[in-house]
Amino acid sequence: MLAAERRGEILEKLHSEKRVIVSELSQFYEVSEETIRRDLERLEREGFAVKSYGGAVLNEDVSIELPFNIRRNKNASGKQKMAEIASSLVNDGDHLFLDASTTAIFLARALKNRKKLTIVTNSVEILIELGDVTGWSVYAAGGAIQKGYLCFHGSKCESMIRSFYMDWAFVSCKAINRIQGMMESQEVFSGTKLAMLESSRKRVLMADCTKFDQSAFAVTGGLKSAGVDLVITDKRPDNGWMEYFDQNEVRCLYPDSPA
């Protein structure tokens, strides 16, 4: 196994178990403890881990952007619940923007029983996911590939998005709070999502419970200013959030929410 592959697996274990032990990893991978310590030092330099005596713990700073495969598996059950709610809103023949979030991948899969959909996305992963679907029109909102991410971004990507007007925009975010609104880890992601929201008739934010009351580097905008009509999440938000949604004329759907 290559060192990069081993570090990726260690990071997955860190994410699921919150801590790892050097001696256990050494035995499992059949390498020296010194090799494992170097792996953990590398993960610490990259911001993913915090070394501790005999091992390391996960750095749970929300501003740290995890690798795509880790983010895709994070709260997978919550993303599946949100995808089921979102897919129930979509009719055959609808036109949709799907952003490059891992949540949107779950939605793309949930939509496969629909007919004659038109999808515009900047996600390479969604393009691959929908590559074998027949009867749909799928467009890549192309541009520059963002290093470390399976997505397109930039002015060309945003220009193509704005050349369409869709029935739905389904976007996610890195974090959301009641002061700054929606936020992303990088400014380029905010621009793409805003272009989708501005070019759609119905605008939906899909954000699981881990995103609420958090903050990140780049402000995308408030729900009202961005024109968000609907928030879909995986658990009922607290009363403060429900009042905030009412004040901003935003509907909130979650599992077992009132019809």
Image (cartoon, rainbow, N blue to C red):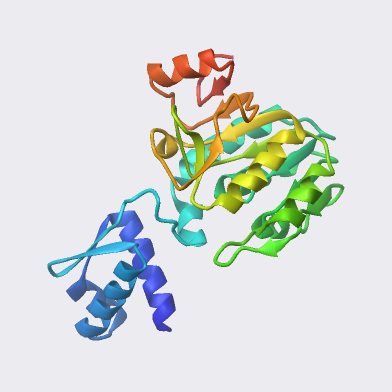
**Is residue 130 in view from this perspective?**
no
Q: Percent x, y for residue 242?
A: 46, 17
* Residue that appears at 71% across and 40% down: 196
In this picture, residue 214 sits left or right of residue 94 = left
Q: Percent x, y for residue 189?
A: 59, 50
Q: In which quarter of the image is residue 8?
A: bottom left
Quarter of the image with the C terminus in it: top right
Q: In which quarter of the image is residue 230?
A: top right
In-front residue for pair 83/213:
213
In this picture, residue 113 sits left or right of residue 257 = right
The extreme left residue here reads 53
Q: Percent x, y for residue 194?
A: 66, 40
In-front residue for pair 218/108:
218
* Residue that appears at 58% across and 19% down: 251
Quarter of the image with the N terminus in it: bottom left
Q: Percent x, y for residue 49?
A: 29, 63
Q: In which quarter of the image is residue 43?
A: bottom left
Q: Is residue 122 above or below residue 107?
A: below
In this picture, residue 188 sits left or right of residue 20 = right
